[in-house]
Amino acid sequence: MSTIISPIPIGVQDCWNRIGVNGDQSCERLAQHVHCRNCDVYAAAAQQNLQRTVSDDYKKEWAAHFRQVATDNQQQDASCLVFRVGREWLSLPTRMFVSVAPIAKPHRLPHRSSRGLSGIVNVGGTLYPCMSLADLLGIDDSEGEAATHRHTFARLLLTQWEDQAYALPVADLHGLLRYASSQMQAPAATINKGLSRFLTGVITHDDMRIGVLDETLIGYQLARTLR
């Protein structure tokens, strides 16, 4: 059965499909909001969409869809956040992340030169240790941008491991992705050793090959670097 797509209600201005992230990205608000989902215009359209009248045919289609027995390919039992460091698309489990913030320049800490610790950053009045995944994983983050055919925006990923929060700068953010853990593949032998020892596998999404980072190893390395 094909995916059911709800039409955009009459009267809703779907600017995100024309000048936003799904369009030509010419909207002057993108620089401020980074993504359309952070804009009040998008939020107002979502509210209007949720308040629309749902037809009986639409209900019947979804009822038929959910009555189908799930196949192995449909059992997406894992969720991750996908981001890019250098040219490498990587992911960590969704549960590790607290929020996403605009990129900020870290301030160096005196007498601290641990590899991977870039300094501290101020996000909304709270100070976070800024950790470089590029340094920890042996990735050259000076390499040119991946061919995404769209504008990219560097971000800070605010993450929590045990009782400590961290800020992780990334070159680009793809977003949340659900996948079937049974479909995960072994990392390619050509991946650099610094990165490969932190990977549990690789998943494929569209034309992207995404390295799945080991949550425990990354958390341990972050904590160790901060000591």
Image: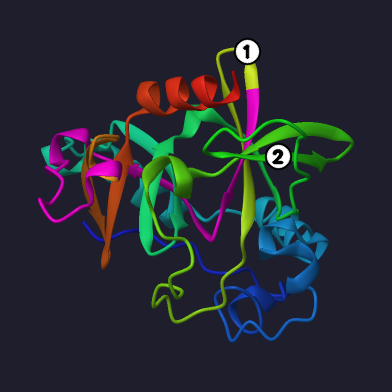
Q: Amino acid at mark 2?
A: Gly
In the image, residue 157 above or below residue 21: above
Q: Earlier in the sequence, mark 2 or mark 1?
A: 2
Rendering quarter of residue 146 = bottom left
* Residue 168 part of the magenta segment: yes
Rendering quarter of residue 152 = bottom right
Relative to 206, 154 lies left or right: right
* Residue 177 part of the magenta segment: yes
Relative to 123, 167 lies left or right: left
Q: Residue at horizontal 29%, vertical 43%?
A: 194
The residue singled out by tag 1 in the image is 163
The image position of residue 117, as x and y in percent, is: 60, 37
The image position of residue 190, as x and y in percent, is: 14, 56
User: Mark 2, residues whose alpha carbon is within 10 Å: few (<14), some, or many (≥20)?
Assistant: many
Rendering quarter of residue 9 = bottom right
User: Mark 1, residues whose alpha carbon is within 10 Å: few (<14), some, or many (≥20)?
Assistant: few
Which image quadrant: the C terminus? top right
Relative to 51, 70 lies left or right: left
Q: What residue span does the magenta drawing correspond to?
A: 165-194
Q: Secondary structure at mark 2?
A: strand
Q: Closer to the camera, 48 or 41?
A: 41
Q: Residue at horizontal 60%, vertical 24%?
A: 226
Which image quadrant: the N terminus? bottom left
The image position of residue 93, as x and y in percent, is: 42, 32
